[in-house]
Image: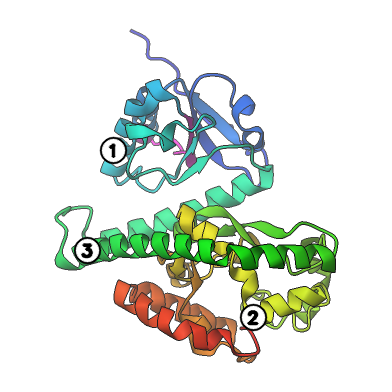
Amino acid sequence: MVEAVLPHYPLQKKSKDAFRILFVGCGEPGDSLIALKNHDLISAPNYYQANILLNRLHSQSHQLPDAVIGLICRADAKGLRDFISFLKGATAFSGIPLIIIDRKGVLSRGQARPVKGIDEIITGEMAPGKLGIKIALLKKFKALKLQQSLKRGQLKNDIPNARQILYKTDGVFKRVMDMIISLVALIILSPLMLVIAVAIKMDSKGPVFYKSYRAGSNYRVFKFIKFRTMIMEADNRLSGMMNMNQYTPSEKRDPVFVKISNDPRITRFGKFLRNTSLDEIPQLFNVLKGDMSLVGNRPLPLYEAKTLTTDSLAERFNAPAGITGLWQISKRGQKEMSAEERIALDIQYARANSFANDLQIMLKTPKAMIQKDNV
């Protein structure tokens, strides 16, 4: 019996930014996600065949994919759950990000949604450049988590210790608190939000809300929302203003964070919103959806997040993304705060992340909010 030819990636990558992707599902990949056309693909018709293909690639020392991107429908739900268990059960595959294209919302209904194991769910089209950044961030996070698990021996012993149980319990309390407080706050603040929306429209041309992609917990990318405080097309002008950045570059690398002193892009009413932190109110929608928490490390724009991928810096992404956090209450108003100090505080929070610490930060936040300058 002649063995079927094993699919393989092109010897020459399409570009230096191209990733090797295993696409799972029927139909042409480009019909499901246009951005896939910029990457090197092999495909499997279903998750069972994807399981076999990965095993053969590994056993024959072929290049493993940088990511698995798959379609989902009701008929595939069990196959997807089995595939997730397969990826998690083998060290060789546990570092491969799993991204699911779910156009019909199958994973958000009933028991079809796997509890864990999916790194990202895509419900619409994605710009070509965004997919590459997403894969790069997810790969780095998965590699970091795998390295930490190997050091702790967790891959050999799945029995949770007391600290792991405590973290799980804290996570439940944290999510319940986030949902209750964000929902109540949105109801109470809705009249104020309406007034702010009218004032923004009267002050300058453009939408009421500013939306952008941010990297939060586990490098997860989501659409971040706040009240617009800048003129239209402000993001497009940023590259020409880097000489005004408050965070100056170090000898080893370019500046990690971007903050413009006396930013000319900020509108008159936008300055008031920023000084009073009222522009942050719409982030309560992100909290309610589960994209963010009330307390955590600030979600970063993608151009900032991609500079924090070394093991020593990526640890800050182990914590939830939040509206307020440790560095906001510790250094708010101090313009001399360096990028290194900010990262150190983020990592400190990630290592000591607990429900009790969150309560302390929330109690200190109102005092920090009334200070004149933002960090």
Give the amino acid at mark 2.
Thr
Give the amino acid at mark 3.
Gln
Residue denoted by label 2: 276
Identified at 61% across, 78% down, the residue is 252
Viewer-nearest of labels 1 and 2? 2
Name the secondary structure under disc 3.
helix
Residue 140 tag number: none
Which percent across, then down, holds residue 259?
69, 77
Name the N-terminal-most of marks 1 and 2.
1
Viewer-nearest of labels 3 and 2? 2
Callouts 3 and 2 close, C-beta under 8 Å: no
Which percent across, then down, holds residue 275?
67, 82
In the picture shown, does residue 106 fall above or below 291? above
Residue 85 tag number: 1
Residue denoted by label 3: 164
The C terminus - image quarter: bottom right
Stretch in magenta: 58-71
Looking at the image, residue 196 sits to the left or right of residue 296; the answer is right
For the view shown, which residue lies furthest in the top direction? 1
Give the amino acid at mark 1.
Ser
Identified at 29% across, 31% down, the residue is 82
Quarter of the rendering containing residue 265: bottom right
Name the secondary structure under disc 1.
helix
> For mark 2, does the 10 Å Cα neighbourhood hold few (<14), some (14 to 19), or many (20 or more) residues?
some
